[in-house]
Amino acid sequence: PVEGTVRFIRHDLSQPLPLPTAAFDRVLCCLVLDHIKDVQSLFAEMKRILRPAGHAVISVMHPAMMLRGVQARFIDPHTGLETRPESCPNLVSDYVMGAIRAGLRIRHLSEHTVDASLAARSPRAAKYLDWPILLVMCVRPEGDSTTA
């Protein structure tokens, strides 16, 4: 492929990724892990496709949101139909230990809350003031000696 292009694939993430081993410098996994029961297997696949000095950035809806009854939902702009993909009640420790057991080293872990500034800009977010809504991780293959 031409540099700078993106190729999208549709794939069942409970199955191994149809991608070559050690082929990627970066993996980006956004708002997916809260829909995966076996997070360790997906982390293992991230490790497999990463080059030794590569890293993966993962964002996921914070598990605390499920305590508030919040789950992902999407509205089809063409039909107006609402879709609620199945959510899995993973804990922060499930993500941390899943990455570690898959042979990844956690380089960064942060929890992001709704602050007053966000609540002022988004009335929908205001009801979650001071609650963690997002968990972000950056991981690298274990044994990589490069710094952050």
Image (cartoon, rainbow, N blue to C red):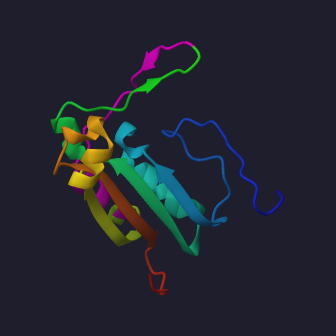
Is residue 83 in the magenta section?
Answer: yes
Is residue 123 in the magenta section?
Answer: no
Q: For residue 37, say whether it is visible.
A: no
Q: For residue 57, say whether it is visible.
A: yes
Q: At 54% across and 35% down in the image, what residue appears? A: 12
**Residue 68 x %, y %:** 17, 35
Q: At 22% across and 56% down in the image, what residue appears? A: 93
62 and 98: which one is in front? Answer: 62
Q: What stretch is highlighted in magenta?
A: 79-99
109 and 112: which one is in front? Answer: 112
61 shown above or below 76:
below
**Residue 53 x %, y %:** 56, 78
**Residue 111 x %, y %:** 26, 59
Check the picture and name the quadrant holding the C terminus: bottom left
Q: Taking 54 as reference, is 43 left or right?
A: left
Q: At 79% across and 63% down in the image, what residue appears? A: 3
59 shown above or below 47:
above
Residue closest to the far front: 120
Q: At 16% across and 51% down in the image, what residue appears? A: 130
**Residue 1 x %, y %:** 82, 56
